[in-house]
Image: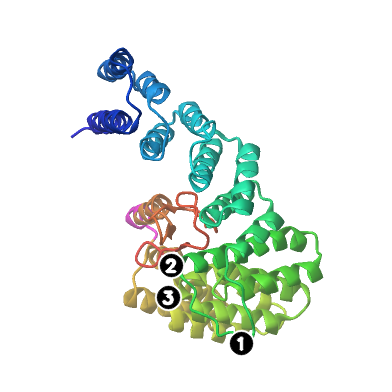
Amino acid sequence: MSAELLQFLFILFAVACGWLLGYWYRPKQKSSSIDDNASSYYKGLNYLLSEQAGAAVMTVINELPVNIETLPTHLALGNLMRSKGEVDGAIRIHQNLLSRPSLPKDKLYQVHLELARDYISAGLLDRAERLLRDVVDESTIYRMDALAHLQNIYQSEKEWDQAIAIARLRLPQRHWLKKQATPTADERAVECALSHYYCEKAQPLLAAHNIKSASKELEMARRYDSSNVRAYLLSADVAISQKKPQQALDLLHTVIERQPAYASEVLPIFRKAFSGFGDRSAYLDALQRIAVQVNSAAFIIEATVIMAERDGYDKALSYLCDAAMQRPTLALLSAVIDRSEEDRGPSVVLVRQLLDQLKFERPTYRCRHCGFSGQKLHWLCPSCEQWGTIAPIRGIQGD
């Protein structure tokens, strides 16, 4: 069944329900008035049949009584129009509901929330913010929903301090005398978002060499989410800036132990931290240990480069070939061909080009929440807008 037919049947059902509810719950009227209203509904049905859905919905809204029984029909039609992209129509529906004082107060707050969603869809964030603030202050039932929308607004506008303040309101109050309950999935998502908000604040501070302030922000980031890879990578950069390479290495080892999939992201900072010691043999030993621990192609290739400097080309190539035999990946196969000097014929060049093409065409990162994939690491998934869910791909095509 096509989407257009399903949509038509849904609107037709909503119209029928609204008409029946309005008929049974309204006061008795004269037959002429009934005939006039019936004529309006038939007019709406004619709009539907002529595929003028917007006109049909507005005709029904103008004629359908507004009361507690018909409210679900109004809200369903408003949500339908918003989902179709007809935001102006959805706004008119919900504004029409707010103009009727006959609705209970809690239902009016529900309409406020729906109207705020309309404004968000239309990009009218200032109007949405005012409505949501009212719901937060006055409604206990819809307070958490309003806070979630407010947090998303401030996040989209990169107003990190306000986003942090709102996100904190979504978490239960912690008390040192009370045993902490296990966070729910929603609470963990809020904590993860908070951690990344502090990282967002820390990055410009670090770029401006304001190390002290950046360290405070990153400490809060790690406190809210101890598994936030981004917070540890930035903290390691801070430690390097403070001439504390061992502290940076400790932070990076924490990432490798807790999130081994991110080993390829750790390597550049790991290299920078070890440069502070100036011991290439110790660096090679560390690379090899981690390569065995997490089976990372990036660490294996880096170890091959250092091994060639210290032990010679043959030993380095043998180490690389053994690693490729144990776990063949595009990256390792490309590295083997790059370092092989015996055969540079057309076939080898062709294989190298094909491998490069495969590496270029294959995604490097994938979101664990929605499956979005790409060549760049996003801390906020562009598809599902979840924080910290995109990770390097492991396997033949990945690290």
Residue 282: give its label.
Answer: 1
**Label 3: few (<14), some or many (≥20) within 10 Å?**
many
Residue 325 can be seen in this image: yes
Q: CA distance from mark 3 to mark 2?
A: 14 Å
Q: Which residues are magenta?
A: 344-350
Nearest the viewer among 209 and 382 is 382
Identify the residue under disc 2: 399
Up the image or down, 364 lies above or below 171; here it is above
Q: Position of residue 71 (x, y in %)?
A: 40, 38
For label 3, the residue is 320
Q: Earlier in the sequence, mark 1 or mark 2?
A: 1
Which mark's residue is nearer the viewer, 1 or 2?
2
- Cα separation between marks 1 and 3: 19 Å
In magenta segment, residue 345: yes
Residue 49 position (above or below residue 125): above
* Type of the residue with mark 1: Ala
Residue at the image position 65 percent from the left and 46 percent from the top: 157
Residue 228, relative to residue 93: is it above or below? Answer: below
Amino acid type at image mark 3: Leu
